[in-house]
Structures are given as structure tokens and as C-alpha cells.
Image (spheres, grey):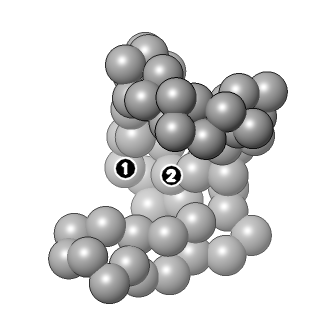
Amino acid sequence: MTLVTDQFGRSVELTSGAWHQIVARYSEMAPYRADVLETVRAPDHHGSDPIEGRERY
């Protein structure tokens, strides 16, 4: 599990299980775990998601 803080001060958790699920579906993402966490911590863009309660980075 890795915990990062987003630009609004919220804690965001990426568990090993969640990461394995992402990589199982999108294998090309495997080398970019640190980049994904950095994007959550300090995104270039932030917006809403069509699904309520979710956000896009």
C-alpha cells in the first residue's frame, strides 16, 4: 500500500491489490506506478468524472 496526499490535502491510497488489478487490465502501465502516484499528488490537470464521487487527474 502507498499513501499520497492530493492537492486538496486528502489522503489517497493505492493498495497492492488495486495496482495489480490495473496492471492486469492495462499491462503497459506496469512501469508507471510512481508516475501515477505523482500525478495524484501534483496533477497537471484535475476535473470531474461522469461517475459521481470520482475525479480525473
Label 1, secondary structure: give it. loop
Residue under label 1:
10
Name the side, left or right, on which 42 lies relative to 17: right
| Depth order, front residue of 43/25 | 25
User: What's the residue at 44%, 16% (across, down)?
Assistant: 16
Where is 18 relative to 40, above or below? above
Please say whether residue 44 is visible from this viewpoint. yes
Residue 10: x and y in percent read 37, 49
Please identify the quarter of the rendering in which residue 33 is found: top right
Mark 2 Cα-neighbour bin, 10 Å: few <14, some 14–19, many ≥20: some
Where is 43 relative to 25, above or below? below
Residue under label 2:
6
| Depth order, front residue of 49/46 | 49
Where is 56 relative to 37, above or below? below
Residue 42: x and y in percent read 68, 55
Name the side, left or right, on which 13 lies relative to 46: left
User: What's the residue at 49%, 70% (across, down)?
Assistant: 56
Residue 57: x and y in percent read 58, 66
Which quadrant of the rendered structure holds the N terminus? top left
